[in-house]
Image: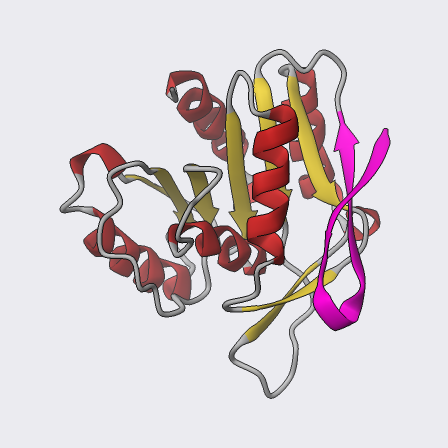
Amino acid sequence: MQVWTPTSNGIYGPVEVLALEKDACAGTIVLFMGGLKIRYSVDKVNSKGFSHFNDDELRAVDFFVDEGFRVLVLRYGQIFRWGDRWVDNVCAWVRRIFGKPKTFLVGHSAGAILALSQLNAQKPSITNIALLSTPHLPPIKRKKFMKYNVFLIHGVLDKPAHETHCKIFQLLEPNPNAGPLHVILNVGHDVWSSTVTLDALKQWMDEAS
């Protein structure tokens, strides 16, 4: 397990990531999970660090490592405000250091908000993006998404994510190369509780360019 510090989160200090891998020949996954809710704020989310992952989240990490992926996760929880650059900086660093053969950005819940920021980036570094149980859609300025490969997953019982993913689908639909693929599972917000999530992500990654 390696520790890297690719960037800083402004006043909150350095952003440290852990690299988890065995035989990382299949590609690199940047994985952002949800976190604690921040009261009285609609513009900030919290993505938790690796030590706070629950059993289903740890199982997901183990699955991808066993499948030959390098998985990068936050060492400690980080606050993200829409418009912050530190996620862009992490993605650019990942692309530069681990760019081959493929790179992926996967976010669940609040972590999906972090992943969404690459859809809004002027020069996105990672364009294979999976959004899981996205709670809401921040304002996205970009109008064209030809370079993107987007995968949406949420549970049928998760109404906020369903509404958000419908909006994202409508945003991306005019761009045929951007997808998006959309999977709805018979679960709630915690899509990691279904093994279908891991199998669907693995197939999407295998087919990505």
Residue 37, by quadrant, is: bottom right
Name the foreground residue: 124 vs 200: 124
- Look at 33% across and 38% down and name the residue there: 148
Q: Which quarter of the figure is the C terminus placed in? A: top left
Q: Is residue 17 magenta?
A: yes
Q: How is the image coloured?
A: secondary structure
Query: What segment carries the magenta color?
Result: 1-20
* x and y percentages locating residue 184 in the rendered image: 35, 44
4 relative to 125 in the view: left or right: right
- Look at 50% across and 50% down and name the residue there: 115
Residue 64 against residue 134 in the figure, above or below: above
Name the foreground residue: 63 vs 18: 18
Residue 29 visible in this rendered orientation of the protein = no
Residue 95 visible in this rendered orientation of the protein = yes
From the image, give the main secondary structure of the stretch colored magenta: strand
Name the foreground residue: 53 vs 119: 119
Q: Is residue 63 magenta?
A: no
Residue 184 against residue 66 in the figure, above or below: below
* x and y percentages locating residue 158 in the rendered image: 42, 60
Q: Which quarter of the figure is the N terminus placed in? A: top right
* x and y percentages locating residue 68 in the rendered image: 64, 15
* x and y percentages locating residue 114 in the rendered image: 54, 56
Count of numbered circles in the view:
0
Q: Residue at the left extreme?
A: 174
Residue 4 against residue 97 in the figure, above or below: below
63 relative to 52 in the view: left or right: left
